[in-house]
């Protein structure tokens, strides 16, 4: 599930029908469960990506320092042995494989922030519904 799909789902789920406030209040636990399940799934995917990042970083470090197996260099030649820490870090920062996994982790972080806001909004939904009921009572003269 990607961020666009989650945003579309939330756009549909975020609306509160003022004519069916009782039904809306009953949907709160379902919405909480739905978005918390997605949150947990994305959290696990992010942790998996972080583990991959660590492994790939070690592989790329060995590659740039000349310590990788010979078959790696046969597939992807690198004629230099980088010795300075700054130079190694520059190569790692510019590495496409690491950049791809870093981008994936940042994407998961953004998705998780959005889901946290959704869960917070779902948790506060009872107050919104209560306020809508109070407003209807006020307008009716109660």
Image (tube, grey):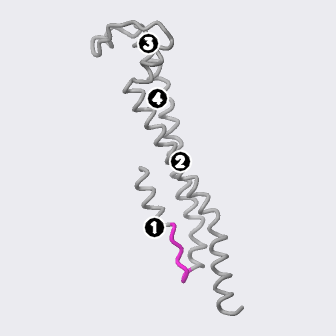
Quadrant of residue 75 within the rendered picture: top left
Vertical position of residue 24 compared to residue 35: above or below: below
Q: Are marks 2 and 3 in contact (CB under 8 Å)?
A: no
Give the mark nearest the N terminus, 1 or 2: 1
Q: Are marks 4 and 2 in contact (CB under 8 Å)?
A: no
Compute the Cα span from label 2 to label 3.
32 Å
Q: Secondary structure at mark 1?
A: helix
Q: Is residue 51 left or right of residue 133?
A: left
Q: Quadrant of the C terminus?
A: bottom right
Labelled disc at residue 12? 1
Q: Are marks 1 and 2 in contact (CB under 8 Å)?
A: no
Using a 10 Å C-alpha cutoff, classify the residue at mark 4 as few (fewer than 14 neighbours), some (14 to 19) or many (20 or more).
some
In this figure, which residue is indicated by the disc labeled 3? 62
Foreground mark, 4 or 2, reads 2
Residue 14 image point, x, y percent: 51, 67
In this figure, which residue is indicated by the disc labeled 4? 52
Q: Which residues are magenta?
A: 14-20
Labelled disc at residue 112? 2
């Amino acid at each position: 599930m990607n961020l666009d799909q989650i945003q579309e789902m939330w756009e549909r789920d975020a609306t509160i029908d003022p004519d069916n406030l009782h039904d809306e209040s009953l949907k709160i636990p379902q919405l909480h469960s739905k978005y918390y399940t997605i949150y947990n799934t994305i959290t696990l995917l992010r942790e998996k990506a972080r583990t991959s990042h660590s492994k790939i970083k070690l592989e790329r470090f060995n590659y740039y320092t000349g310590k990788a197996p010979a078959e790696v260099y046969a597939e992807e030649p690198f004629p230099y042995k980088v010795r300075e820490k700054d130079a190694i870090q520059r190569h790692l920062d510019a590495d496409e494989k690491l950049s791809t996994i870093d981008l994936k982790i940042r994407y998961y972080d953004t998705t998780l922030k959005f889901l946290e806001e959704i869960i917070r909004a779902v948790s506060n939904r009872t107050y919104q519904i209560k306020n809508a009921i109070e407003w209807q009572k006020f307008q009716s003269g109660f």
